[in-house]
Amino acid sequence: MHPIRRFATYRNVQDGLEIEVTDDLEQLGQVLKRLGSDDAQEIDRMIAGARAVAEMDPGLETPPELATLRQRMSRLWDLREHVGDVAHFRHSVADWARSQLKSQRLRRFVTHLAPEESPALVLLFMLGYLGRGWLSRPIGGTARFRDALVASYQASGGETRIDTTVEEILVENNRATGVRTTDGTIVDADVVVSTSSGPETVLRLLAGRYGAEATRLRLEKWKMFSPILLVSYGVDQPMSEAPGTLVLDGLPPLQVGGREDAGLTVRIFNDEPAVAPSGHTVVQVLAQTDYAFWATRGTGYGAAKEAAAATLLSSLESVLPGLRQSVRMTDVATPLTFWRNARSWRGAFEGWLPTAESFFGHVDKTLPGLNAFFMAGQWVEPGGGVPSALLSGRHAVQIACKEVGRAFASPTGV
């Protein structure tokens, strides 16, 4: 794993403000206090809160579904020292910034660093884990990470089917017995675990027979991550001096995929040789978009992708001069791409957005009335992300072991 030392560089293209967010939280605090001297006390509280929440026990060992009353009470007791931080930063990033920060520039900065609807606690966790050196990414990219998981599973005696889509979860006498794939193949199973999106799993693969009411209620009350347009440009220059991640603010309003936005997130993979040949790199831009726009393009879908890629490239040219003439390939992923490849409901690439309601909520990994079936992945952990998805898989196996009367044992002893 490659530890992340520089999380992102925020840049307001209108006033030239640039803030580098690194694992040196003390330095970050000093920079922010120079930006908003009247907010010095709140900035100190934010930095101190970030360090404090990083000390909190994340509760990795026992799934909430298996926790005893004694374990729950013990966890609450352990959290008693953090009640003040939780209470102060429980409001959304937008509401906290509006009520606690006087500097308008500082408000814009924090609301571009984390989703505005998320509790400010999410911002604290991100900064706290960054400061502790706990944020990292796999060397070799996600493909190498995926391959390592597959190899580990196969080494344990498992068999894998890649690029296979499940069309139905088979049920007999209220027990999951296997799956049917798109080519008609029936795969029998003693236990079925779905890591597809919650709505896809419950409403389509299980035809709404189990857990549909709770799922529909979440769809009504909880927010999902906004669908994104992910455009990758392969360029014939290393761009070694550019920041790895740029959070751009104050751009001229962009109309991309049915949605107007004045901010973009740009990733420049200049420290990962696996993504491009020597002397080249990949510049990837993330823009929020509209699912319905892409779902209704019909025969104009390809042309809409090309137009969006051209619009974003023009916008980036002012920030990364010379980019346009260096582009040698372009890849465009729309919300439909996320749906096709990962069955992400309406293109919500990380599932439920961690709002004040969902962040403190819970999604069961089992469904009422259905045996031998479990759910894991980003849609049972509001906020998404690879670490929480992996943890949910561990927890699902622990619950399955409990149900069938077998002891849970990690191969690594962790």
Image (cartoon, rainbow, N blue to C red):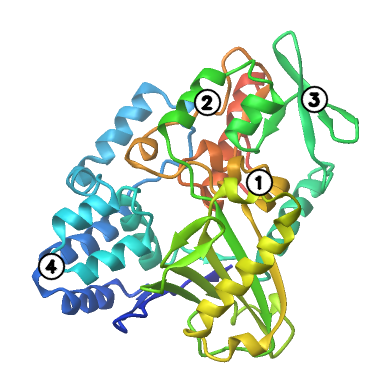
Q: Distance from label 4 to label 1 (Cα)?
A: 46 Å
Which element type, helix, strand or loop, lies under badge 2? helix
Residue 165 found in image quarter: top right
| Residue density around tag 3, few if under 14, some if 14–19, many if 20 or more, within 10 Å | many
**Label 1 SS:** loop
Q: CA distance from mark 1 to mark 2?
A: 25 Å
Decide: is 50 above or below 213.
below
Q: Where's residue 221, x and y in %?
A: 40, 31
Mark identifier at residue 296:
1
Q: Earlier in the sequence, mark 1 or mark 3?
A: 3
Dot placed on the residue nearer the N-terminal end, 4 or 3: 4
Residue that label 4 marks: 39
* Residue at image location 14% in from the left, 62% down from the top: 42
Provide the residue designation for mark 3: 178
- Nearer the observer, 67 or 33: 33
Q: Disc 4, disc 3: CB below 8 Å? A: no
What residue is shown with label 2?
215
Between disc 1 and disc 2, the foreground one is 1
**Which secondary structure, mark 3?**
strand
Q: Is tag 3's residue or tag 2's residue first in the polypeptide sequence?
A: 3
Query: What amino acid type is highlighted by mark number 1?
Result: Thr
State the CA–CA distance, disc 2 to disc 4.
41 Å
Q: Disc 3 marks which amino acid?
A: Gly
Q: Which tag is nearer the camera, tag 3 or tag 2?
A: 2
Residue 41: where, in percent of width, then height? 11, 65
Q: Residue at x 67, y 24 (%)?
A: 373
Q: What amino acid is at disc 2?
A: Thr
Ranked by sequence position, the earlier of labels 1 and 2 is: 2
Q: CA distance from mark 4 to mark 3?
A: 57 Å
Q: Residue at x 44, y 27 (%)?
A: 67
